[in-house]
Image (cartoon, rainbow, N blue to C red):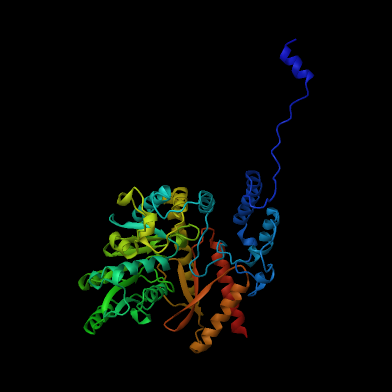
Amino acid sequence: MNRNVAEAEADPPIEPEASPAPAGPAAGKDMSPAEFRQFGHRLIEWVAGFLEEPESWRVLPDVRPGDLLAGLPDASPAEPEPFDRVLDDFERLIPPATTHWNHPGFMAYFATTGSGPGILAELLTAALNAQAMLWRTGPAATELEQAMTGWLLRLMGLPPGWEGTINDTASTSTLYALAAARESLADLDITDSGMAGRALPPLRVYCSAEAHSSVDRAVMTLGLGRAGVRRIRTDPELRMDPHALETAIGDDSAAGIRPMAVVATTGTTSSTAIDPVPAIARICKDHDVWLHVDAAYGGPAAILPEMRYIMDGCDRADSLVVNPHKWLFVPMDCSVLYTRHPAVLRRAFAVSPEYLKTPEGDTVRNLSDAGLALGRRFRALKLWFVLRYFGQSGIRAALREHLRLATLFASWVDADPDFERLAPSPFSVVVFRWRPTQGPEEAVLERANARILEHVNASGEVFLSHTKLGGRYGIRLAVGNLRTEERHVRRAWELIRGAADRLAAD
């Protein structure tokens, strides 16, 4: 008999080595790899189930202010707690009190998507914990950001010659752009000498009456005051009127006010109007004024060849912002600021204390030189994952479907004699209101449409928002979530029509 066989028969079988059981929380120690695997599997399963059945949750939670706060203790635990208890409390407390932006019935504001590849990228971002303030502290984060902003630039059809950086939101990107615009007024020497106590001319920023409130916030933050913003009237399609802009710049210059920047928008927040950027760019060039373009929402649509026109004239802008977290399926937050004058942007923010100097010197880009934040997250990773997972064809297919759904919804509004659209719908947002043929006065209509909106949102199936255009209250339906299908848009219309019918019957 073979000796090895005999020994194998004589000896008891060798049991496979069991994985060590999770040790549980220990004071002052991180979670063990065994714990991480155990709870990581549980979390992945929870997220997968959440993405698989997003409609199992109300899109707008049925909670009142303070409900969650009342369910939390007043202080953190004195001793370590088992992590399964933390996860149990998460499942019990947080999703029911969350407004679910990943719900296919979320059609308020600008709908967004936390896509699968983006969510997985966020896990890796947290694990790497990269801090990309300098090239040396985050080489991969720095260089991937350079690559991804270049990919996105080409996707939107813009020419080379721009430098991009990724910030959190468009409000921050617009602040940085206007800070660069102020820095471009080199004769005022504001960066070194400041603005207080000096005989400087008033500075002014121009935007349309429909521009985002981030322009006002940026101007206030930069010390120009609320008077530093001049809002320009719009045409019947809610686009900035170039003639009114040129007149305003001329009048201000004659009055001793220094024009600093113009903010044009491709996709305004309320109605998604597209300002005439070519005409605005010509005016800015004639008056030597910085042009910033807010393409935070509309920019991704330019990935579609048939929508490339929305970027007409943008190649002559000095800066531009686009938000991949709005309509490019990247989880919050990810806002790309482009500029053709990166040296001006860096002059507005760069500070080089000794402890931030590195041997690479000026041979590398240090991302913290392009804004207020010294610490910078590895946001480019999720943009990389999303652009690769979907590819150009997948992104275009999703964008075209959203445009189709918005056009379909607009056709239902247009065909119903009791409803009207309040603005054109060049993208995937429709602004409309209930207005019977023998409709009442504006104040009554506003209350009625507010009641319709409240009823629809109370269903938990759909979440819409509102705005005012020309003093008229309107309901906004914004298609943009990757999981929104035609049935969700149809259900929204059913809820709207049902609420209107009940209102008419009262």
Q: Is residue 230 above or below residue 267?
A: below
Which residue is painted at 32% across and 51% down in the image? 361
The C terminus lies in quadrant? bottom right
Q: Is residue 29 above or below residue 92?
A: above
Q: Is residue 272 above or below residue 150?
A: below
Q: How many discs mark residues in the rendered view?
A: 0
Please say whether residue 340 is visible from this viewpoint. no
Along the line of sight, the residue nearer the viewer: 23 or 436: 23
| Picture quadrant where residue 421 is located | bottom left
Residue 470's x, y, as percent?
41, 82
Query: Percent position (x, y) of residue 363?
Result: 30, 49
| Residue 281 pos. (x, y %) | 26, 69
Residue drawn at point x = 52 percent, y = 53 percent: 122
In the picture as drawn, the residue positioned furthest to the top comes out as 1
Left or right? Give the position of 470 relative to 449: left
Q: Is residue 159 visible?
A: yes
In the rendered view, tell whether residue 16 sits above or below residue 336.
Answer: above
Q: Quadrant of the N terminus?
A: top right
Residue 171 falls left or right of residue 498: left
Q: Is residue 361 left or right of residue 504?
A: left
In depth, the one of 168 and 29 nearer the eye is 29
The image quarter in which residue 83 lies: bottom right
Can you give x and y, in whole percent of width and height, for residue 300 in the image? 40, 60
